[in-house]
Amino acid sequence: MASLEHDLLQVFLRSRQELRRYLLRRVQCSEAAADLLQETYLRLADYPAGDEIKNWHAFMFRVADNLALDHLRSRMRQQQRYVGQPEEDIVCVKPGPDRVLAARQQMDRFETLIHALPPQCRSVFLLCRVEGRSYAEVAEELGISVRTVESHMRKALSRLQADADSIT
């Protein structure tokens, strides 16, 4: 058994710097790498089947890699668990009741303005803007020219804009 401990110590001492650099690359923290290096040696020293290990160097790196992986998983769980204090500048995506009311009132005023348009002008506006039809489709459906559709749209938009400006 003394020979086994001596072999382990020799392999560990020869590979210590290489193993430390490997752990440092793996966990990105020098203190954690140093702790994992020490833990690697302790795990190897406590390993019961030392005689069965043919390649101590490879085995040592496997143990270190497993410890590093456990460390990274633990760190990730801690980060997920820690949410911290909520910040005051967190924006709520849901509008407040005052904004909802203001939007409803604005929509009601807009509907009133649309219904105040002359019937042909209102039909053209609703077909184009609400139903998304092209001027040609509206012209064909209403039996008027595309120029007349354009004229009604200009009239509707300018009237709605003027009325909206007078309200606000």
Image: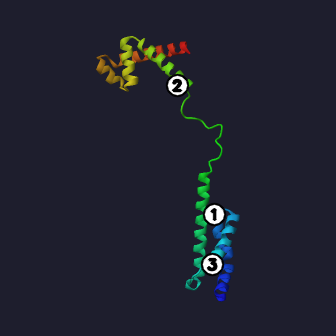
Residue placed under numbered mark 1 in the picture: 27
Q: Secondary structure at mark 3?
A: helix
31 vs 117, left or right, is right
Q: Amino acid at mark 2?
A: Val
Inter-mark Cα distance, 3 to 1 = 24 Å
Quarter of the picture holding the N terminus: bottom right
Amino acid type indicated by mark 3: Asp
* The C terminus lies in quadrant: top right
Decide: is 36 above or below 77.
Answer: below
State whether residue 43 is above or below residue 24.
Answer: below
Pick the residue in front: 106 or 75: 75
Q: Horizontal and vertical percent for residue 35?
A: 68, 68
According to the picture, the residue beneath numbered tag 3 turns out to be 46
- Identify the secondary structure beneath mark 2: helix
Give the mark nearer the N terminus: 2 vs 3: 3
User: Residue 53's x, y, as percent?
Assistant: 56, 83
Q: Nearer the viewer, mark 2 or mark 3?
A: 3
Bin the neighbour count of mark 3 within 10 Å (Cα to Cα): few under 14, some 14-19, many 20 and up: few
Task: Name the residue located 35 percent from the left edge and 13 percent from the top edge.
Answer: 120
Q: Nearer the viewer, mark 2 or mark 1?
A: 2
- Mark 2 — residue? 100
